[in-house]
Image (cartoon, rainbow, N blue to C red):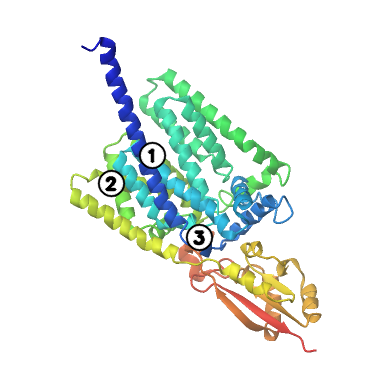
Amino acid sequence: MNSPAEKIEMPFSSSVKVFAERNRLDLGICLTLTALAAVLRFWHLTDLGLTHFDEGSYAMTGRWLATFGKEGWIYQSGHAPGLFPTLLGLFFLIFGIKDFVAIAVSALTGSLTVGLIYWVGREQFNRKAGILAALFLATAEYHLMYSRFALTDATFTLFFWASLASLHHGFIKSDRRWFIIGGVFTGLCWNTKYHGFFPLLILGAWMIVIALRQARNQPVRARALWSNWGLAALLAGLIYLPWLLFVQFSVGYGAILQAQVDHSIGQSAIILTPPTTISFYLTHWLSPALLLSALLGSIMILTRPRAEALFPLFATALFTIAAMFYTSFPRLLLPVVPGLCLFAAHGVERISRAKTLAWLLAAVTLAWNMMGAHRVLSLRTDAYRQAAAYLQKFDAPVLTQMSKNFYFYERKKSVEMRWQNAAVLDSIIQHSPAGLIAIDPIIHRFPQVEQWFKSQRNHLQLVHGISIQMYEPVYYQGFAPARLPQLPPTVAPFHPGRAKIEIFEWRNPR
């Protein structure tokens, strides 16, 4: 006969065993989903190159770190804080200074985000919703594109959602440890982009909303939560402090703040990115099935509100609204995409009583997603690497005016024309029997260079042209997409299907 102690011990041991098995199952699912996302994000990685202007800055700073200051550029504080280029430098040290190695950082963090969203969906809803959310994000064209850029955005999105999830879990459980973890993730997020403190603001706003709803019924708990929030903010600030000091003693932090003002409240309009532009981004790079499911899931969350499920909807909505007050850039909305995948998964999962319809909607969403994913995976974005390889074959002076990302590829440095006056450029041509001039559409942003080039055009022969394949967000930088056909090339130099690198040759008679 079992003793009372044995009767207590047996259920406890059984519970621990069930809990451990459940955790192992969740871990296995998470790793499988992350691996699936990695297959898509690392697919033909060596066919990829740098096509966005800012990729050049980050990659050159990574080179500067990997070569201990011998090559590349020091941190460019006007673009973003230093964490992402530091990761690039670390990857360059380990795997070599290659363009696809820089892109691999985003491919890795994008893959990890898929695994993270499984856990978030698992906690906020249930396991089925977590699996669907991760699958939707793994195949979402919008997220897949940025996972194949050497830009900060995939990394920022990972830290953004890790911060939100940790802080919110700490809020629900009143657990200081999760606030500490959330503070660390927020610090990393802040060191990736200048608005990386948003998770703390979002949770703070949520805590105010909850406090107003509870009508001061739990003042002791509220004081403890705000104390924990303050601790998280302090940790985030301490992690960000080294970068703040670097900026302050280099360009001055006021210059960074002024740049943010110039892109937001410093302009004449209050709403700088109207809802129509946000709608264009989302409908252009996310499948209608995903958006429909997300709308369905959002309605279900609102009609049967639970605080745990309302928080990601609140966070996504608040971030989207904040994006309207900043100059239009497609990358600003990337953190919204995991939220939409969560709501879509919830919408599909909630109609699971009609199992045939639920599975059909999930299958249609994934199939539609994969059509967009196929467009992304079929691109070969190494035009600038091809151009550099072509130019390196000639033992002659080379004049260039191309996007910053091109200069990552140069082994023998060219003369970038925007840094020279017309007399110097004329002298190079006059005193060299032959040479090359390479340009891309960015030349339209430099009127003096373009004017000089046009004055020489009759003496030049086009010898090589390379079509620039690039992901569509590169075309829409700082303006409403509907205006693209009407904008002058000084504002929107790159146009879909028309962007080329052109290489010209001059020859002087002997």
Q: Give me the C-alpha separation between circle 3 and circle 2.
A: 34 Å
Q: Quadrant of the C terminus?
A: bottom right
Q: Which residue is mark 1?
A: 27
Give the camera-side residue of 107 and 157.
Answer: 107
Q: Which residue is mark 2?
A: 347
Q: Secondary structure at mark 1?
A: helix
Residue 504 at x, y percent in the picture: 66, 80
Mark 3 packing: few (<14 Cα in 10 Å), some, or many (20+)? some
Q: Earlier in the sequence, mark 3 or mark 2?
A: 3
Give the camera-side residue of 287 and 449.
Answer: 287
Q: Which mark is residue 446?
A: none
Q: Is residue 324 visible?
A: no
Mark 2 packing: few (<14 Cα in 10 Å), some, or many (20+)? many
Residue 499 at x, y percent in the picture: 54, 72
Q: Which residue is mark 3?
A: 45
Residue 303 at x, y percent in the picture: 26, 40
* Residue for point 51% across, 62% down: 476
Q: Left or right of 462: which side holds 148? A: left
Q: Give me the C-alpha separation between circle 1 and circle 3.
A: 27 Å
Residue 74 at x, y percent in the picture: 70, 51
